[in-house]
Amino acid sequence: MSDSAGVKDVTAEKLAEIKEAAEELSAGDRQKIVTPEYMFFEAPRERAFITGSEAAKEAIRRSNVDVAISYPITPQSETMQQVGSLWAEGYVKEYYRGEEEIGVMSAIAGSSRAGARSMTATAGPGLMRGMEVIASWPGGRIPAVLLIMCRVVNCPLAIQPDNVELAYLLNSGIILFHGENQQDFFDYTMKAFIISERPEITLPVAVAVDGFFVTHARGYVNIPSKDIKLPPRNPYAEAVPAMDNENPPARLSRDAPIQKSNFISYHVHASWQQEVWAANDRARRYINKYMGGLIEVVNPEAEIMLIASGSAVSQSREAVRQAEEEHNTKIGLIKVRSLRPFPTLELREACKNVKRIIIPEFNHMGWLHREVVTALYRHSTAEIVPGPRVFGGMSMPTEMILQTIFPEKKFSF
Amino acid sequence: MSFKNISITPGWEKYMTKEYQDLVERGPYGKQKKVSEMGSFKEVLEEHPMCAGCAMTLFIRLTMVGLPNPEHTILIGTAGCGRLALTQTSIPFIYGNYGDTNAVASGLKRGLEIRFKDQAKDVVVMAGDGGLADIGFSGVMHSWFRKERFTTIMLDNEVYGNTGGQESGMTERGALLKMAPKGKMFDKMDMIGLAQTSGVAYIARLTPTNPTRVASVVRKAVLIAREVGPTFIQAYTSCNIEYAIPTPKVMDDARDIESKRYGFMEIISDEAKAYLESIEPAKKVKK
């Protein structure tokens, strides 16, 4: 039966061709594009026991990232190393190790302006070094994602967790989320891309976690299949044009006559700054939609309320449990997910009937305390306790929080 | 740029300025213009706020003529005089932070290569000696080491002109300038040598004394950067204000400096040479 033999051969040939073509496709190309809503809320998830760095890697794998640029710094290095393997596997299209953070943050500005979905990560002194550039991203209306694994800012040298660096980001115009654990790091990172690229937002988003506590410790993370990914970026649906010369020529600079000191110059800059902060504020809608709100409230009826962000939330949760189980007192807890935009109205509402507010922080200067005091001024009669605080790498024993809750009792820590 | 992006919507021609209509009808897009044709086509840079007699402005105008595909080029600059003219070109121009040009260009070029697989997008950095040799030095060197595929053009006026005349690393030893009240204490930096050491595919040093040569060098540099690797042009573009060169003598000064220490120099790798030969004869045959 020569005919059927012939058919068989053709089929085999075709199969080989298809196989070859499939092999030519990168791992990323083989992923199925799904809507953000499906990815965030509907896709079946499996529970994994992984570190924060691995959680970030798995988020990047599913985020359809074009360009990732790395530079080592403890405790971040592991994350961008892992993103490097994603590039090697074909999940990320372009990756390289930059010269240092100013170079990396500048290159991210470049790749984002090219219309490519771009991300990097840094920590402590690295954030400080890249700060000139990072602080210019919002003004440049750069959609990009920056992961931050907080550590001590030198000097003296230390690599330990301490989140004072976030204080510097609060006034930059960047959208800033602070994750509590590995699950948050996974979820916030993917959501950050979608929020960053919204036409009415078009701003960089930073997702911070506390170094080591989250990055190097394992936790349970529910993750969807690696066979799906977020939709690609559409650089033609954003607030400023991509600099790809497919738009009418544009310039990212003010004209010479209006860049020096004159009335028009002041107005150009003033209105630009207002628009950056207005765009930052417009992110609220998507934080509510995708992240369940700017804050989470535990025991809303409680008269004593803990307000915390990052790892301080986990310690506070445990303190809340101990207060109830061991001291028969119901304590409230507000987890602040988004530091910029800041949940001013949400805090006022949640603290309406609160008598005492305690703000545990992992830094010396107490930036969250200042933010809360500013938000609640004349909107609450509660006593606002500045602390407890640990810094320089210390962990926060729950007894430290309990001592602040129950000053009349004696806790050892 | 797709040409349609600058084309005027039918019916709106009479509302557009003459300059814009000229740019659409007689601009350099889609066809490489020659220096000898200047005056007969609409240049991408005409009006600018640069000082009278500025050699840098002449050099920038000639550079724009040399670009092989201005419609697919993105310019990157940093603080300095050059960007005052570069912002006035009808080519997308990115001005970021101090000394960030070559890092931005690295990210931009790689991003564009992902998005435009079938259309070459040329990235050209144009910045001053301070921007490239001092504050942007690390970025420049690393972009060369990484073999990033874009062109770096140094507008070397041997001084921080825009901030009012301070010495730079490219200033000649002994020059009396601000922040060098006893004269500059060390030699002019050898950026050509550093470019060679880091394996730049095409290096040229020149002054604006020969306009055709400027355009030709820029064209080569951009083409080579597209396919082979990083290219570097170091151009003497005097600051007649800070060096007190009388306006009518600016070109005399350029010729003088050229003959003494800034002679035309071109260093091209074998690979770059072979590439140029592979595309240029084809063009000649067409003619």
Image (spheres, rainbow, N blue to C red):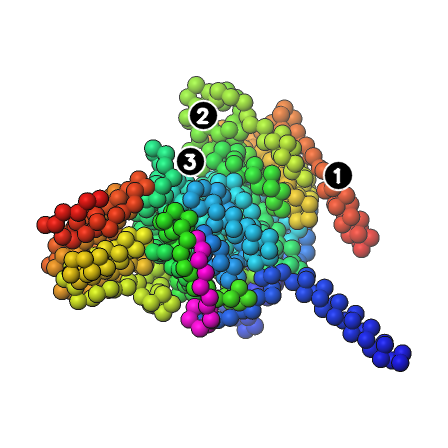
Callout 3: helix, strand or loop?
loop
Q: Amino acid at mark 2?
A: Leu
Q: Amino acid at mark 3?
A: Thr
Q: Which residues are magenta?
A: A38-52
Q: Is residue A51 magenta?
A: yes
Lower position in the chain sequence, tag 2 or tag 1: 2
Nearer mark to the viewer, of 1 and 3? 1
Q: Residue at x 38, y 47 (%)?
A: A211
Nearer mark to the viewer, of 2 and 1? 1
Lower position in the chain sequence, tag 1 or tag 3: 3
Q: Is residue A165 left or right of residue B33?
A: left
Query: Disc number at residue A336?
Result: none
Q: Amino acid at mark 1?
A: Asp
Q: Quadrant of residue B6?
A: bottom right
What residue did someone put label 2 on?
Answer: B177
What residue did someone put label 3 on?
Answer: B163
The chain under label 3 reads B
What residue did someone put label 1 on?
Answer: B270
Residue B47: x %, y % from top left: 51, 49
| Quadrant including the N terminus of chain A | bottom right
Residue B90 in view of the camera: no
**How far separated are the C-alphas under marks 2 and 1?**
41 Å
Q: Is residue A408 left or right of residue A113?
A: left
